[in-house]
Image: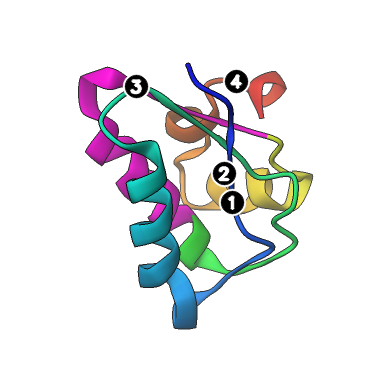
Amino acid sequence: MADPIRVPERVVFANATQVLDTLSGAAGTGAARFDLAACSAFDSSLIAVLLELKRRAGTAGCAVSGASPNVVKLARLYGVDQVLFGSRSDA
């Protein structure tokens, strides 16, 4: 995989479509890794964006790293933590 693509500090309903378009464009058609380390202001839209990025990546693959415990908790609440992060230690 190429260098990680940084997810912005803020991902909320108001900017989710723009963030998705930006990250999707940055990922291109190859395997991508998204770094959530800077993402500190978010709502459930972040989970939707990450799921859509995974869907778009398809067989090329998509990994997510640097997730804060709160991001992991939110993904777990929606039942998609294993889909996004594999195991807790991968986040």
Q: Are marks 1 and 2 in contact (CB under 8 Å)?
A: no
Q: Which mark is drawn over residue 36?
A: none
| Camera-side residue of 52 and 4 | 4
Q: Are marks 2 and 4 in contact (CB under 8 Å)?
A: no
The Cα atoms of the two marked residues, 1 and 4, are separated by 20 Å
Q: Amino acid at mark 4?
A: Ser
| Horizontal relation, residue 85 to residue 45: left or right | right
Name the mark nearer the viewer: 1 or 2. Answer: 1
Give the extent of the magenta segment: 47-65
Farthest-out residue, bottom: 14
Rendered position, 45 above or below 1: below
Closer to the camera: disc 3 or disc 4?
3
| Residue 62 occupies quadrant | top left
Percent across and percent down for residue 35 are 63, 38
Name the residue type under label 1.
Answer: Val
Majority secondary structure of the magenta segment? Answer: helix
- What separation in Å lies between label 2 and label 4 (alpha carbons)? 11 Å
> Where is residue 33 shown, x and y percent of the image?
51, 29
Distance of label 1 from label 3 (alpha carbons):
17 Å
The disc at residue 7 is 1
User: Quick one: 31 or 46, which is closer to the camera?
Assistant: 31
Q: CA distance from mark 3 to mark 4?
A: 16 Å
The image quarter in which residue 9 lies: bottom right
Q: Which residue is mark 4?
A: 87
Q: Residue at x 69, y 41 (%)?
A: 67
In the picture shown, does residue 35 fall above or below 47? above
